[in-house]
Image (cartoon, rainbow, N blue to C red):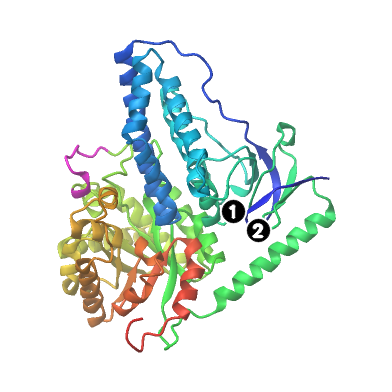
Amino acid sequence: MEVRSGRALQPGAALGPVYVQLPRRTGEEPSTFQGEGEELARFEGARQRTLLQLDQLYRRTREQVGEEQAEVFHLHRLMLEDGDYLDQVRQAVRGGEPAPGAVLAAGETFAAALEELADPYLRARAADVREVSRAVWEQLQGERAPLELDRPAILVADDIAPAQLIELGREKLLGLVLRNTAPQSHAAILARAMAIPAVTGVGGDPAWQGREGALDGARGLFWLEPDGETRAALREEERRAREEATRLAALPSRTRDGREVAVCANIGSPQEAEEAVRLGAQGVGLFRTEFLFLGTEHPPTEEEQYALYRRAVDAMKGRRLVIRTLDLGADKCPAWLPLPREENPALGCRGIRVSRANPKLFATQLRAILRAAAGGRVAVMFPMVTSVEEVRWAKEQIEACRAALRREGTAVGPLEVGVMIETPAAALLARELAREVDFFSLGTNDLTQYTLAMDRQTGETAGGWDPLHPAVLELIGRAAEEGHRLGRRVALCGQLGADLTATETLLRLGVDELSVPPAAVLPLREKIRGLDLSGPAE
């Protein structure tokens, strides 16, 4: 047994095989200068591709982990738009330096300047500058340094990029053993948000590959080939942590004045459903099914979808699972789905509009959902609704699929039907929509965007993005009032639900259920237990 001591990044214990990530290439290989115009064009193309990649990572992180953690990718975008950084790269190219070398040199210059500062947070931003420059370099070289784990493992590396954390996900990373990651780095912040046990200050060795490892994130310790006593101690630590989580999860989500508030999870895969239950979710308020359709050469078949939905249903162990139908369009366009090119995709063919334009695709998904519902408590909801007629059409498709499955002798289950209130039109039509559905789910990310006529990223840069804007709150309150008038449950699954400073406001507006990233479930339940809504707002 070999023991290494480092510094704690994230408490928790991990046992499993070790995967050693060798240092990524840094671009020392010489590049041939192709001429100033060609090199500048290469740089700009790589920069634009990196910006697109950062936007995708921002959205994925925001949806899976939370708004605060997603900000790292917004910050990276700002770095790639910084005039001083861009000028330095372009000047180096004009002086005869190939674009890859110019990018890395500029990144190193800016990173070194940050490392000279006294503020530890600003010093930690040096890693972000290097990471962004490396991402552009990889685009220029036409390569990416993918990190693929064929089984869950303890990752040993010099450092890890925030993008790699998101791409691998909690289910593949048992723990992290890092050499150079500062506690203030965005990678460390993200690892903590994802509850991945982590240690820093420990150097790795390629000879460790595939051997058994163990780590204690609270004490900053890593063992290679731990003995039986160490393994037993770490398993006991894991057991106590699970018991504590179970104890907290068993406490009611009830305000001090007795109001019950369900706290559910937003997920994008069956694995996340299992994690959500472990972290105290009382159900799933949003299963984003579009992630099953992205990054594939063809849409998943009915059988493939059914297997995934049924796994999520089984993971719920009787808890309610709300499945959102395809929310493709805008920034989520798989190659196999030909959508019209639009000047403003956010206002174009997306959500329920895509389903109406592709009824066979929609029917395949509905059939899989109906079959999965035979195994548990399932609800379905439709995104981007702006009219009653859209809801009636979608309900007709459900009944047609139900009838066809029954004729085939296939078991189906009952479905609650709901709509996303994420457009001002849906909020203003809440009374009429409530007559058609069983529940509402407020998607405050898009509701804010469309109410304020302001893109999230542009608005945040300008300081105008505000999900607690009086107009947004007016629409939330209206939807809740109209939903309750007919006894409909009103949930909220937007990122605002995880903002503990907004919890009291949302509950006073009439929201019955909050659905948030799994890691935010227990903190939110604790917040709810501390509120008293019987008196004036605090």
What is the crowding at mark 1: few (fewer than 14 residues within 10 Å), some, or many (at least 20)?
many
Give the residue at mark 1.
196
Q: Amino acid at mark 2?
A: Gly
Q: Amino acid at mark 1?
A: Ile
**Image location (x, y in percent) of residue 413:** 40, 67
Relative side of 116 to 216, left or right: left
Task: For mark 2, give the secondary structure.
Answer: loop
Mark sitting earlier along the chain (2/1): 2
- Place residue 382 in its image quadrant: bottom left
- Place residue 322 in its image quadrant: bottom left
Res 323 label: none
Give the residue at mark 2.
12
Instruction: State yes or no: residue 246 in magenta.
Output: no
Magenta span of residues: 338-347
Tag 2–tag 1 contact (CB < 8 Å): yes
Name the quarter where the N terminus is drawn: top right
Query: Can residue 320 be seen in this snapshot?
Result: no
Please tell me which residue is depicted at 51% across the width and 38% down the height of the picture.
Answer: 116
**Image location (x, y in percent) of residue 232:** 79, 59
State whether residue 15 is above or below residue 125: below
Please tell me which residue is depicted at 38% across the width and 60% down the height of the picture.
Answer: 323
State whether residue 363 is above or below residue 236: above
